[in-house]
Image (cartoon, rainbow, N blue to C red):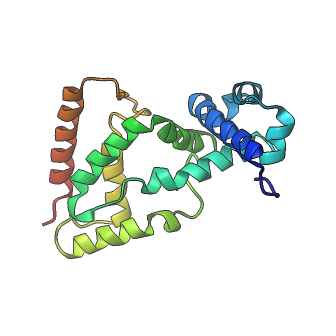
Amino acid sequence: MPEQPLTTRGAATYQRILDVATQEFADHGIAGARIERIVAAARTNKAQLYSYFGNKEGLFDAIFFGSLERIVNVVPIDATDLADWAVRLYDEYLRRPDLIRLATWARLERRPAGHLVENPDRLDDHKLRAIAEAQAAGRVRAGDPFDVMAMVIAMSMAWSPVSNVYAATAEEPQELHDQRRTLLHDSVRRAMAGA
């Protein structure tokens, strides 16, 4: 990140780099992304990019960690209605497929095992507490709250941009999305129902 405050023009260049690089990394991953394409599309130069981010990995980190809050928290959890949460996650994947692809590239190229980030507690703690409270109230099935959360997220990603079966897009007919939402909602509701 830049050490000195950006001028208005510098801030615009900085944001163009982030916008272009987000799509570049989403499309090609860390290894496949090309600084030359980023600077050309952002209408800047390598020296400017490197002064802001240090190197390609620093640029990816700025984008990934900057988007992590959105990836993790843009769809607030309602542990009393995990089925609705899953459907809202599905909708977010349709809105921002690039963010899901960034997380997947981070998984593939940076952290192939374990948690996606080093300190997941900071990101997931409120979700895990909410699930544990819903479990204690008998609204959500017993089990490790993390595993319950992971299963709901996995179910919500069945048609996501990184699905191994079928990647849905926002351009598909609304009726098709409605059918998927209904199936997802019913499946999560049944799978996660309390005793």
Q: Residue at x 67, y 49 (%)?
A: 62
Decide if residue 73 is on the left or right side of residue 84: right
Q: In the displayed structure, would residue 193 be above or below residue 43?
A: below
> Where the C terminus falls, by quadrant?
bottom left
Decide if residue 165 is on the left or right side of residue 16: left
Query: Total of numbered circles in the picture?
Result: 0
Q: Is residue 57 visible?
A: no
Residue 185: image x %, image y %?
19, 46
Q: In the displayed structure, would residue 72 be above or below residue 27?
A: below
Q: In the displayed structure, would residue 60 be above or below residue 84?
A: above
Quarter residue 30 falls in: top right
Residue 171: image x %, image y %?
34, 24
Q: Residue at x 60, y 37 (%)?
A: 22
Q: Is residue 13 visible?
A: yes
Which residue is the extreme one toward the left? 195
Residue 2: image x %, image y %?
79, 53
Q: Residue at x 55, y 40 (%)?
A: 102
Front-most of residues 108 and 13: 13
Quarter residue 149 falls in: bottom left
Front-most of residues 88 and 195: 88
Q: Residue at x 72, y 46 (%)?
A: 11
Residue 123: image x %, image y %?
49, 63
Decide if residue 39 is on the left or right side of residue 117: right
Which residue is the extreme one toward the right? 47
